[in-house]
Image: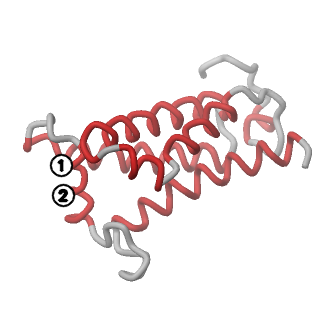
Amino acid sequence: MNQKLIKLFLRLAIAIGFLSAVADRFGVWSKDVSSWGNWESFIAYTKLINPFVPEVLISPLGILATTAEIILAILLIVGYKTEFSAKLSGYLLVVFALAMLTSTGLKGVLDYSVLSAAAGAFALSQMKEKYFELDNVLKLPQGKLV
């Protein structure tokens, strides 16, 4: 498989992973395959993995994480500022991994492949050649934040 297809695969895999998790929070997945199944269960999980966060900030934290996942997924799918979006995705996934690790332990981090996804996001952020990306159409200089 050539690097262009690997880059496209990474973009879509990370984005779809984010969107699948978001869909789960809103009950899109059936109960037999769902991790949370609804927003309330997701917020309870957010509280579980962030015990150091004051109760009043748990819901806003869940909203922030969900919004970030939706925005980053869209940016990765369309290929807008791909390297920057991938790097932010990697950081977000590392934050998730650290929250999970410090609260529930290593098993969840490994079972949900959070570290693998973060590594994939950071690898994607290093791939400079454009392929099937909005950045190609816009002809933005690489490395510039516009």
Q: In this view, does 75 lie to the left or right of 23?
A: right
Q: Is residue 22 left or right of residue 119?
A: left
Q: Residue 44 carries which label?
A: 2
Q: Dot 1 corresponds to which residue?
A: 47
Q: What element carries label 1?
A: helix
Q: Residue 71: x and y, percent?
A: 49, 45
Q: Residues within 10 Å of mark 1 (few under 14, many from 20)?
A: many
Q: Which mark is residue 37?
A: none
Q: In this rendering, is residue 128 above or below 42?
A: above
Q: Which residue is depicted at the point 39% across and 67% down?
A: 24
Q: In this view, does 67 lie to the left or right of 3?
A: left
Q: What element carries label 2?
A: helix
Closer to the camera in the image, 133 or 33: 33
Label 2 and label 1: CA atoms lie apart by 5 Å
Q: Which residue is depicted at the point 15% across and 36% down?
A: 53
The count of marks equals: 2
Q: In this rendering, is residue 129 above or below 17?
A: above
Asked if the residue under mark 1 is in contact with the one under mark 2, i.e. CB atoms within 8 Å, the reply is yes
Quadrant location of the C terminus? top right
Q: Residue 36: x and y, percent?
A: 31, 67
The part of the image, by quadrant, that contains residue 56 is top left
Q: Residue 74: x and y, percent?
A: 57, 49
Q: Residue 118: x and y, percent?
A: 55, 38
